[in-house]
């Protein structure tokens, strides 16, 4: 749902995220789930297994990926990776040389190619648009929408940050998409993004705004923005600053929260979702606690009042497009059952 002036109507609980993001700061590294592409197909790698995203109606490769972008590696330079030989889309083995910050090789790379990235011979353009031997890319942390099917089926829905690499041919279109969201007043973590392939260009992706998230979705998404796995993926200790935002209408329901809150016994009933003001936001060492402001005129609900929490969750119902899928219901039950168990213990 868009306002007449082209602005995206962001849900209340996402309005503290500044759409003008300051992508700077320090670097870390880690291990994580990842999404790869090969031959214009999407694959999720997790727990040593590979799962292919497919269309449920015929099992063919899924042409698009619906995700929420949690965070992006800070600029100004892109990350870099060097493999000798021909470029391969789904390269998974360790590179010969790599740089997270795009300035100098990372400590411990097998064979550093040069003291700095800019002076490296592998960073030089080849003639006849041959590209560079050292490939630039943008590191992005995402969470896939759980209604997408995989082969084989996932044992549980992926509700954790996932590594996604924007390849060299897609860097300009990705920046243009993020700039457009910024112009329309929406932080990338407050909307659903659809990623597909450009049919006219071999390695270029297409990024499209699908719909805004809801306040109910915020209970799941906001904690993941500062999750340690997200920080490891993007290599950043980025800080989101709170900014004032004009009042807007509540966006349409997306179904994101309901997919993680549905019971197996009945499709109509929903498992209690935590209120954002009751959920502690994860933070790095030594950083101040985030404070989530209550809407004017509302009082914070005590954690022990389970009935009020249930009513707060049911106030923002959300239904995915595949309500009759028992396989998805089972996965959602496993995910939310684990999360609620930890909260109530």
Image (cartoon, rainbow, N blue to C red):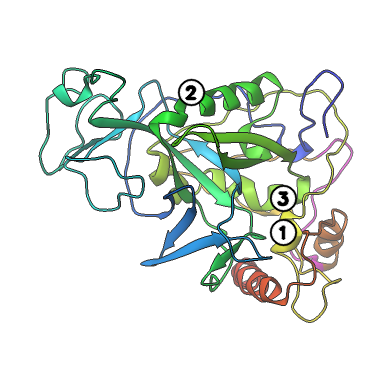
Q: What is the crowding at mark 2: few (fewer than 14 residues within 10 Å), some, or many (at least 20)?
A: few
Find disc 3 in the rendering and name its residue: 217
> Can you tell which mark lies on residue 229?
none
Q: What is the crowding at mark 3: few (fewer than 14 residues within 10 Å), some, or many (at least 20)?
A: many
Region rendered in magenta: 295-306
- The residue lying at 49 percent from left, 62 percent from top is 52
Q: Can residue 50 be seen in this view?
A: yes
Q: Pointers 2 and 1 in contact (CB under 8 A)? A: no
Mark 3 vs mark 2, CA separation in Å: 29 Å
In the image, 338 versus 303, the foreground residue is 338
Mark whose residue sits in front, 2 or 1: 2
- The residue lying at 25 percent from left, 19 percent from top is 125
N-terminal of the pair, mark 3 or mark 2, is 2
Mark whose residue sits in front, 3 or 2: 2
- The residue lying at 72 percent from left, 77 percent from top is 326
Looking at the image, is 24 positioned above or below residue 273?
Answer: above
Question: Where does residue 319 sit, x and y in percent of width and height?
Answer: 81, 59
Find disc 1 in the rendering and name its residue: 274
In the image, 181 versus 288, the foreground residue is 181
Q: Is mark 2 on a helix, strand or loop?
A: helix
The C terminus appears in which quarter of the rendering?
A: bottom right
Q: Pointers 3 and 1 in contact (CB under 8 A)? A: no
Q: Is mark 3 on a helix, strand or loop?
A: helix
Find disc 2 in the rendering and name its residue: 172
Q: Is residue 289 visible?
A: no
Mark 3 vs mark 1, CA separation in Å: 11 Å
* 7 relative to 100 in the view: left or right: right
């Amino acid at each position: 749902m868009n306002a007449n002036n082209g602005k995206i109507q962001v849900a209340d609980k996402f309005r503290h995220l500044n759409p003008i993001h300051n992508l700077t700061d320090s670097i870390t590294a880690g291990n994580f789930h990842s999404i790869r592409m090969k031959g214009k197909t999407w694959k999720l790698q997790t727990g040593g297994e590979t799962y292919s995203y497919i269309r449920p109606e015929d099992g063919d490769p899924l042409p698009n990926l619906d995700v929420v972008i949690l965070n992006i590696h800070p600029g100004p330079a892109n990350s870099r990776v060097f493999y000798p030989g021909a470029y391969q889309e789904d390269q998974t083995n360790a590179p010969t040389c790599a740089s997270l910050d795009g300035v100098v090789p990372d400590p411990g790379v097998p064979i550093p190619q040069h003291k700095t990235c800019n002076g490296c011979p592998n960073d030089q353009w080849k003639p006849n648009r041959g590209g560079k031997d050292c490939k630039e890319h943008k590191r992005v942390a995402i969470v896939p929408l759980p209604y997408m099917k995989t082969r084989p089926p996932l044992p549980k829905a992926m509700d954790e940050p996932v590594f996604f690499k924007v390849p060299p041919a897609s860097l300009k279109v990705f920046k243009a998409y993020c700039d457009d969201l910024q112009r329309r007043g929406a932080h990338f973590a407050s909307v659903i993004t659809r990623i597909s392939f450009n049919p006219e260009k071999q390695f270029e992706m297409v990024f499209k705004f699908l719909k805004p998230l809801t306040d109910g979705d915020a209970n799941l998404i906001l904690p993941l923005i500062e999750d340690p796995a997200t920080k490891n993926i993007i290599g950043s200790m980025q800080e989101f600053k709170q900014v004032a935002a004009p009042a807007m209408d509540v966006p349409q329901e997306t179904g994101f929260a309901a997919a993680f809150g549905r019971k197996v016994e009945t499709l109509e009933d929903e498992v209690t979702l935590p209120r954002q003001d009751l959920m502690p936001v994860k933070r790095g060492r030594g950083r101040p606690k985030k404070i989530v402001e209550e809407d004017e005129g509302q009082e914070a609900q005590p954690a022990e009042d389970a009935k009020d929490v249930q009513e707060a969750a049911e106030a923002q119902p959300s239904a995915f497009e595949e309500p009759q899928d028992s396989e998805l219901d089972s996965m959602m039950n496993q995910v939310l059952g684990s999360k609620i168990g930890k909260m109530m213990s």
